[in-house]
Image (cartoon, rainbow, N blue to C red):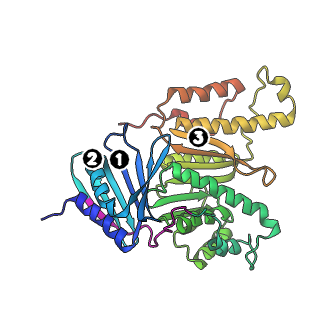
Amino acid sequence: MTQDPIEQFAEKVSASLADGTFVRLVLSSPVKPQEAPTKILGRYVELKGGPHVSLTLRYPTRDVTRNLPAEEAADWVRDQLEKEFRSGLLGTTKRDWQYLHDKSGTARTVGHKPARTEAPPRAHDKPRQTILDDTARDWLQGLGVMNDAGEIRPAMADKYTQINRYLEIFSHLAKDCGWVDEAHEVVLADMGCGKAYLTFGLWHLFHRVWQMPVKIIGVEAREELVAVTNRLAGRIGATALEFKTGTIESAALPPVNALIALHACDTATDDAIRRGIELGAQLIVVAPCCQKELRPQLKHPAPLAPILQHGVMEERMAEWVTDGLRALFLEWAGYRTKVMEFVSSEHTPKNLMIAAVRGEPPFTSAAARERIEQVKTFFGIDHHALDPLLRKQPPSA
């Protein structure tokens, strides 16, 4: 007789708590989204009263935490899957288990290769995690950021600050995309990666810190840099990290979850935005550089004319309008955009970052399209590298 899928999943939860292989629990797809949490996350903790499952109930505007005695976990999970949620994920060090209840009423529990093979710490108060910990020394030394004693080279202090800040920002973006709570592989492409300081940092964050299945592709036009970075990746055993020769437009890429292009010069940033949209990237991150296209076109509309007669002000305005339009084009393509300071200008003058997370169907918002046209008209802009996106039509149903 075939075992009931909910009962099978609940038994796997109980067994993993008993034998110490439990990694995490995720319940999602609520039956009544307006009333229930959007997701519940569970982790194993040791309290004075014995082992518990610490639950985080994630609502749209707040999180609620409660602790459940381990011996009650299986019954609680069984009840939740029978009444409240259609999907469950149990991570263990030996195997991951997924409960699925589709719209047709079919339910099943299936096993997968484990995403993590080591159990996380059991302390209730999780220690503050430093992204660039001792496990980052091998690639930081290989890239010359640290010396053989593990000390940051004085000349590379700003680069170290940049890497750290970038990974902090990216960790928040990854959580916004929902990747940290999922078990599937995440594919990221870093275009024009250069010496790959930030590419190695991304690999470290996903593979070593989060222990997530990930594939990271670094793309660089200079063959000598590609050879150097591939050798370093091989030396430290970074099997999920690959570098290939190519450009933003020409590199052969699979569908990606994220496309990144930092400090791509002039309209190469726009090439990266278009490529990310074409590849269906859930996340697009760019840090623009050398915005030259719009300055010759920029008119001096009243009442800004007296200000823009100063060359430095005109140059800055051209940069702001260029990047502001990029954010608006991304919104037209269905992305939620954030424009932020990458790192302080005392560390690098190239400090603006545009991060976009896909949230709506692309090319459907008349208001988003109209905002682009209004800005272009106000500043007298005839053409922008992303104008071809204005001809896009909503995808057919």
Q: Please state which amino acid type lies under the numbered disc 1.
A: Ser
Identify the residue under disc 2: 83
Residue 262 appears in the rendering = yes
Of marks 1 and 3, which one's residue comes earlier in the chain?
Answer: 1
Q: Which mark is residue 29?
A: 1
- Read off the magenta span: 109-126
Select label 1 or label 3 by which is in front. Answer: 1
- Circle 1 Cα neighbour tier, 10 Å, few/some/many (<14 / 14–19 / ≥20): some
Q: Please state which amino acid type lies under the numbered disc 2.
A: Lys
Q: Quadrant location of residue 368?
A: top right
Which of 278/371 is in front? 371
Quadrant for the C terminus in the image? top left
Select label 3 or label 2 by which is in front. Answer: 2
Q: Is residue 342 above or below residue 388?
A: below
Question: Is 85 left, or right, of 182 in this rendering?
Answer: left
Q: Which mark is residue 337?
A: 3
Q: Is residue 341 above or below residue 179?
A: above
Which of 38/278 is in front? 38
Of marks 3 and 2, which one's residue comes earlier in the chain?
Answer: 2
Q: Is residue 258 above or below residue 50?
A: above
